[in-house]
Image (cartoon, rainbow, N blue to C red):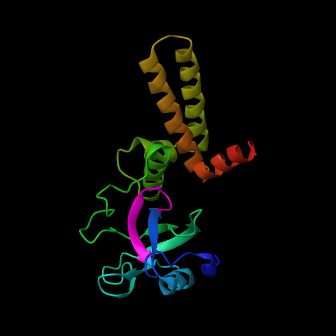
């Protein structure tokens, strides 16, 4: 990033900076940076702002330990606003909330389910169906994916939407368990799909 190309002139040497979770895409907070804060952020990879109330540089987490680890940084088309994607090390807001907008910062959709499956794999839970599947070995997991795929095909021929959706959910779940058993992430599969559409 070429800092000299940024427009710091509109707000007395400050530029607004939106911080977004790099994994969930949830907006975490808004702060302001001057050139020095931006340089420190780029060098240390910990998000640093210029505190307007304290009139000094302020690294998010310097008191709480809940740092924002910078993953990427981008500027808008007018070069007067920054977007930082970061990994938070705890609650972002001083109130203890996940975000300064009082939103829960958690993964959703298949990523959320994948995370639960990986958590079970690392920390087995007694009575967990996921653990019983993983413990049964790759052949059994693969067999279950095949069975669920057949059940989905059968439901596709009928007109019961609820049953079809439930079978689709079963197939998705077992597919994610198979990926976990093979140590492959959903992101790796997504990359292949994206490459096919370039």
Residue 197 placement: quadrant: top right
Q: Which residues are magenta?
A: 21-32
Q: Quadrant of the N terminus?
A: bottom right
Give coordinates of residue 115: x percent, y percent: 46, 52
Does residue 50 show up magenta in the picture? no
Asked whether 32 or 87 is in front, the reply is 32
Outermost residue on the top side: it is 158
Q: Residue at x 39, y 72 (%)?
A: 31
Residue 63 location (% of width, % of height): 31, 83
Of residues 149 and 11, the one drawn nearer to the viewer in this rendering = 11
Can you say whether 58 is above or below 197 in the image? below
* Residue 8 point in image, percent of width and height: 51, 78
Q: Position of residue 133 (x, y in %)?
A: 49, 42
Q: Is residue 32 left or right of residue 176?
A: left
Q: Quadrant of residue 93?
A: bottom left
Task: Look at the image and tell me whether residue 188 can be seen.
Answer: yes
Q: Residue 143 falls in which quadrant of the image?
A: top right
Relative height, residue 155 to residue 172 (above, below): above
Count of picture labels: 0
Q: Please give the name of the residue rendered at 60% of the width and 80% of the height, measured from the top-left corner.
A: 3
Q: Nearer the viewer, residue 154 or 24?
A: 24
Task: State left or right for residue 63 relative to residue 186.
Answer: left
Q: Is 166 above or below relative to 179?
A: above
Q: On screen, 179 above or below 41?
A: above
The residue furthest front is 10
Magenta run includes residue 30: yes
């Amino acid at each position: 990033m070429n800092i000299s190309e940024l427009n710091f002139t509109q707000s007395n040497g400050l530029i607004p900076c939106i911080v977004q979770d790099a994994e969930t895409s949830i907006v975490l907070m808004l702060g302001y940076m001057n050139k020095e804060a931006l340089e420190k952020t780029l060098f240390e990879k910990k998000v640093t702002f210029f505190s307007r109330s304290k009139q000094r540089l302020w690294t998010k987490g310097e008191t709480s330990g809940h740092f924002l680890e910078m993953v990427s940084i981008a500027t808008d088309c007018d070069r007067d606003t920054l977007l930082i994607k970061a990994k938070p090390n705890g609650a972002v807001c001083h109130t203890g909330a996940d975000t300064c907008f009082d939103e829960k910062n958690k993964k959703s959709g298949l990523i959320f389910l994948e995370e639960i499956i990986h958590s079970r794999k690392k920390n087995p839970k007694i009575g967990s169906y996921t653990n019983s599947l993983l413990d049964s070995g790759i052949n059994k997991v693969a067999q279950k994916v095949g069975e669920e795929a057949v059940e989905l095909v059968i439901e596709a021929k009928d007109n019961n939407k609820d049953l079809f959706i439930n079978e689709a959910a079963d197939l998705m779940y077992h597919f994610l368990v198979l990926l976990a058993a093979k140590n492959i992430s959903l992101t790796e599969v997504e990359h292949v799909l994206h490459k096919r559409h370039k």
